[in-house]
Amino acid sequence: MMQTKRVAIFIDTLAGGGAEKVMMSLADTLVSLGHQPELIVLTSRFDYELPTNYPVHVLYTDNKAKINGFFDTDKHAQKLTQFIDKLETSGKYDLFLSNLDDCNRIVAACNFSPCYFVIHNSIEETVKRTKLMGPIKYAFLRQCLQSLNGKQLITVSDGIKQELETVKRIKPSSIQTIYNPFNVNKIRELAEQPDADIPQDDYIIHVGRFAKQKRHDILFKALRNVDSRYKLVCLCNKVGKAKKLAAKYGIEDRVILPGFKQNPYNWIANAKALVLSSDFEGLPTVLIEALTCNTIPVSTICPHGPDEILTGELSHYLAPRRNPEALAEKLNDALRSSHQSSTALSNADIFAKVDAIKVAERYLALTN
């Protein structure tokens, strides 16, 4: 039996994003295996409920604190090092895991070991988008990426790994793929919980932050060509902005905006289809969650992840990105098929790669 391992998981916030959820799921699994994960959250921003089965430490408790200053990396790294030194008076960490750009830049300036940096998104697509935001944001992103040179990287999909090895924008000391962990039984249990807010009428669902990357504009354009009997539920933040965009495309009467939900699984399970309209991803968790809940997922073939999740006959539900007409066509196909056997969903190949226990064991192997 493996000796108990103490694992520090760095993340910039616990806002309602996919990387945050993935790391909390990993921590839950590590606890179930008898280990001691701890979340080290750099800033005090929380959408997710705080866990009670493992510690959460906050570096900056002032909710106005910012960590994205161009010249503040060394200052934050020094504070984080002192913070970890204090936590290690009760025992050394066996593994450090860092997530997301701002966090990675700061952790990379520290000397934690063994330390791995988890890449959750397509780097090249992030670079393209950031260039459009102006030279300052682009220079800051370059600084974040350059901080990963010589570091040990983990990618959440093979697509990201292949991109990094092909483009060579980052020169890591090592790179490997470890898929995101999914506790299928827990998700299915949560999917059974009642929620009085769930619509009685048939609906499609989109789960994701209201951000340019998620392409709600493409989603709303597609909805205009989707069977009018179906509403669209968007579980997102920034409800006001989402409502304004829906009005712009003339479909506000078909869009339901309940806001962020701690438990999205019962909403997903009751939907006739789930849709992902993103420009880019890493390994989109919502597609695997839909499969787990026996809901057909429809997705753009964006870099990276959808084509690693929707394989075999499920690949029929992949549409070219930035093409609302094609996305609508695939959604209509899914809606016509929603009553059919769920065998293809429950037997999807991806489940073997994202089993929570196996994924946690891959991470624990890094402590050796």
Image: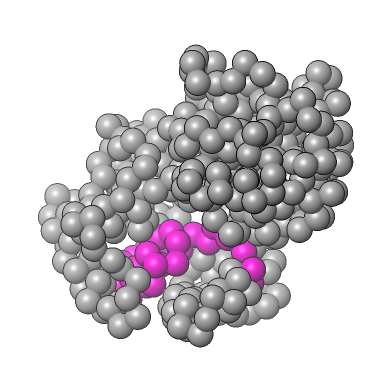
User: Residue 131: in sight, yes or no?
Assistant: yes
- Compare residues 155 and 137 and report the one nearer the observer: 137
Q: Say above or below: 182 vs 294.
A: below
User: Residue 123: in sight, yes or no?
Assistant: no
Identity of the residue drawn at 30% across and 37% down: 50
Magenta highlight range: 98-125
Relative to 233, 218 lies left or right: right
Q: Quadrant of residue 313?
A: top right
Q: Where is residue 53 in the image (x, y as percent from the top left)?
A: 29, 32
- Compare residues 192 and 29 and report the one nearer the observer: 192
Q: Position of residue 171 (x, y in %)?
A: 55, 79
- Compare residues 125 and 226 and report the one nearer the observer: 226
Q: Where is residue 147 in the image (x, y as percent from the top left)?
A: 43, 78
Q: In which quarter of the image is residue 285?
A: top right
Is 101 in the magenta? yes
Q: Where is residue 177 in the image (x, y as percent from the top left)?
A: 60, 57
Is 273 in the magenta? no
Identity of the residue drawn at 67% across and 78% down: 167
